[in-house]
Amino acid sequence: MDATLLEHYKNTDYWFVVNDRKVTLSVGSTNSDFNTLCHGFNYKTGAFITAFNPQSQQFSLQENRERNQQLEAELVGFKGTRYFYGAGQDRSLQWPAEESFMVFGAQQQTVIDLARRYQQNAFLWIEYRHAAVLIDV
């Protein structure tokens, strides 16, 4: 991944909603709300993933939503996981928000495989009591 694209990912807020509560993650930071949810749900990991705009190529909203529906259909079938709706939005608001999923309890390799299948450059990975990291795929 080139340095410019990496900076875009680092300057993005990744948020999801649980019971009307918005939780915002960012690369390199821990998040107490995430840790509380992990503790409550009995999970140790989370992955923030989307199928929007593969390889950073801008698709129409309809195409992106169709891709995310396909991704969600796969997430529904994952045993031992739980997911929530969210979005990734760059802080400068230069790009439209990308509708996404926060998945608790998935194995990192499983998410890597999903990200590759949906032609994503990267996804956000976070572990209980650790800072969120960007996983380049």
Image (cartoon, grey):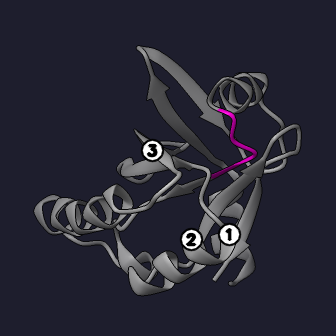
Q: Which mark is residue 111?
A: 2
Query: Where in the figure is residue 109, as x and y percent of width and height?
Result: 65, 77
Quarter of the figure with the C terminus = bottom right
Closer to the camera in the image, 77 or 99:
77
Closer to the camera in the image, 13 or 76:
76
Q: Is residue 34 left or right of residue 88?
A: right
3D distance between C-alphas at marks 3 and 1: 15 Å
* Amino acid on which the number 3 mark rests in the picture: Tyr
Q: Which mark is residue 108?
A: 1
Q: Which mark is residue 21?
A: none
Q: Secondary structure at mark 3?
A: strand
Q: Are marks 3 and 1 in contact (CB under 8 Å)?
A: no
x 70%, y 33%: residue: 38
3D distance between C-alphas at marks 2 and 3: 13 Å
Query: Where in the figure is residue 84, as x and y percent of width and height?
Result: 42, 38
* Amino acid on which the number 1 mark rests in the picture: Gln
* Amino acid on which the number 2 mark rests in the picture: Val
Quarter of the rendering containing residue 86: top left
Q: Is residue 98 left or right of residue 109?
A: left
Q: Which residues are magenta?
A: 42-46
Query: Where in the figure is residue 45, as x and y percent of width and height?
Result: 71, 50
